[in-house]
Structure formats: C-alpha cells, structure tokens
Amino acid sequence: MTRPGPDRSVLLDALAAHVLDHGLNTASLRPLAAAAGTSDRRLIYHFGSKDGLIAALLRHLADRMQAGLNSALPPGPFASEQDLLATVVGLMRSAPFQPYVRVWFDIVSAAAQGQVAHRAAGREILDLYRDWIADRHPDGPSAAPRLLALVEGILVLDALGQTALADAAIAGA
C-alpha cells in the first residue's frame, strides 16, 4: 500500500518557505521537492506540470502577501496619497516583506524573458496589489495605477541601491 503524500496546501506552504528563502529563478523541481519533503514526480502529480506548480506557488505567495498587507493596513482611505505611498514603501522595505519583493523581481525577470506562467501570475499579482491600493487610496480606484507604478519604481531604485533617490520620489509625491 502506498502512503499518501502531503496535500497541496502543505506542499505549497513548504515550497513558499523555500522560495522566500532562496528565490524563484534558481528553483528547479528537485530542490523544490526536497524542500517539500516529497519527490519531483509527486509535485507533478499534484500540480500537473512545472508551469502548473509555479502558477499555484505564485498564487499562494500572492495570497500570503496580501494577507500580511491586510493585517498591516486595514482597508479604508488614507489621509493623503503621500501618506499611503510612504506607508506602503515602508512595508515593502520591512523585513517581513523583503523576501516577497525579491521573489517579485524574480517573477518580473522571468516574465521579461518570456516565461508565460510568470507573466500570467505577475499580471494576477499586480491586479491584486492594485485593488489593495485602490481600497486605501484617498482619491479612489482611478488613482491606484499611478501609485502602483510609483511604488514599483521606488522598489527598483531600492534594489539598485538608490534609496536616496527613491526617498526623494516619496517626498515629492
């Protein structure tokens, strides 16, 4: 008799922990399977393909990040766009969210290289994040895309060691 393996949610939690620690771009099936305490064949069984695994994993990470953001900032408009921007960037710069930012850049990099699963997941994550910002933006949903683009640009500046330039952008918003 074959022992049942871990269920999908247990696998996704283990895979998410591994990816948050080690990044996504270097993740291949065998190290992911080892991190989840299963085999690469079992991962394919649960997720159908490597693309299916990546899509489910990225959705799981997005849901975890959104839960963390919701916990840190309840819905409701901020007093000003600048307050919202400074608060969101502060969260993204904080230790609990830095692993998510690093994985986000892995997703963007893979999407830019034509990885279909990463591009689709990236769009879905951006939609979630845009809606999250829209729920808190003092000017309503129509202002969320611009603030989202500003946050993304600030995160790129931070990643390139240009925090002073990023801070100037926040101050000028």
Image: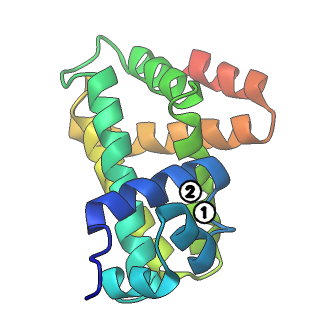
Residue 68 screen position, x and y as percent: 34, 33
Q: Which residue is mark 2?
A: 19
In the depicted structure, whether residue 114 falls above or below residue 35 = below
In the depicted structure, whether residue 109 falls above or below residue 129 = below
Q: Amino acid at mark 1?
A: Leu
Residues at marks 1 and 2 touching, judged by CB atoms closer than 8 Å: yes
In the depicted structure, whether residue 163 falls above or below residue 106 = above
Q: Which residue is mark 1?
A: 24
Q: Is residue 164 left or right of residue 45?
A: right
Q: Residues within 10 Å of mark 2 (few under 14, many from 20)?
A: many
| C-alpha distance separating marks 1 and 2 | 5 Å
Quick check: can you spot residue 3? yes
Under circle 1, the secondary element is loop
Name the colour scheme: rainbow
Q: Amino acid at mark 2?
A: Val
**Where the N terminus falls, by quadrant?**
bottom left
- N-terminal label among 1 and 2: 2
Quick check: can you spot residue 28? no
Residue 2 screen position, x and y as percent: 29, 86
Number of numbered callouts drawn = 2
Write down the quadrant of residue 144 in the picture.
top left
Q: Is residue 70 left or right of residue 65?
A: left
Residue 102 screen position, x and y as percent: 62, 48
**139 or 17, which lies in front?**
17
Q: Which mark is residue 51?
A: none
Residue 40 screen position, x and y as percent: 51, 82
Under circle 2, the secondary element is helix
Write down the quadrant of residue 65 in the picture.
top left
